[in-house]
Image: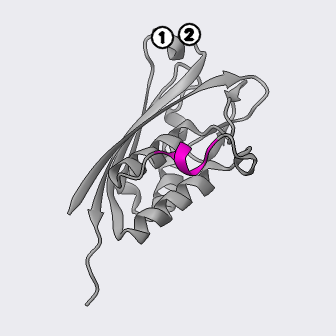
Amino acid sequence: MFRIGHGFDVHAFDKDRPLILGGIEIDHHQGLIGHSDADVLLHTIADSILGALALGDIGKFFPDTDAANKDLDSKVLLREVVEKMTDMNYEVNNIDATVMAEQPKLRPHIDDMREVVASLLNVPINHVNIKATTTEKLGFTGREEGMAAEAVVLLKKMEELS
């Protein structure tokens, strides 16, 4: 059995924070604002998995009202979501994600992000696709006020052991 999920997330920029994206730190003059480390890519991937499982979203499991989630490493968050997925006997078949940002240019970092995400999802790297695009100077991302990301995931039921 297959299940499909979609995730979407946005975060505004802040000059006093590091930029964490796809589980790696990227050299840039500003990072993203959030209760956690604000990794917009890992958040949307987690939301896509939770959506496929009909479990809600990351706010349900990691509310920004909980002090324990302050500055939380989003890799921890995604690992917990993957654990929920595995407990429900599902695994990632493939994931396709897009990050929308004018700056910084993300192409030099895509392969490193894919490696981190594949490792967190326990899948081969060729099951993870990450793309970056600009919004042609339109909207809040075009004005370089923040970043957005979305992801689509296909989960498959793991084979029963007999």
Q: Residue furthest left?
A: 1
Q: Which residues are magenta?
A: 57-63
Residues marked 2 and 1 touching at CB (< 8 Å): yes
* Magenta residue check for 138: no
Height in image: 49 above or below 139?
Answer: below
Residue 139's label in the rendered image is 1
Q: Residue at x 56, y 51 (%)?
A: 61
Nearer-the-camera pick, 85 or 113: 85
Q: Residue at x 50, y 57 (%)?
A: 81
- Of helix, strand and loop, which one carries label 2? loop
Q: Residue at x 43, y 71 (%)?
A: 87
Height in image: 115 above or below 63?
Answer: below
Height in image: 16 above or below 23?
Answer: above
Q: Residue furthest right?
A: 16
Q: Is residue 58 left or right of residue 6?
A: right
Please, what is the three-letter code of the amino acid marked with disc 1?
A: Gly
Q: Which residue is mark 2?
A: 143
Q: Residue at x 55, y 40 (%)?
A: 109
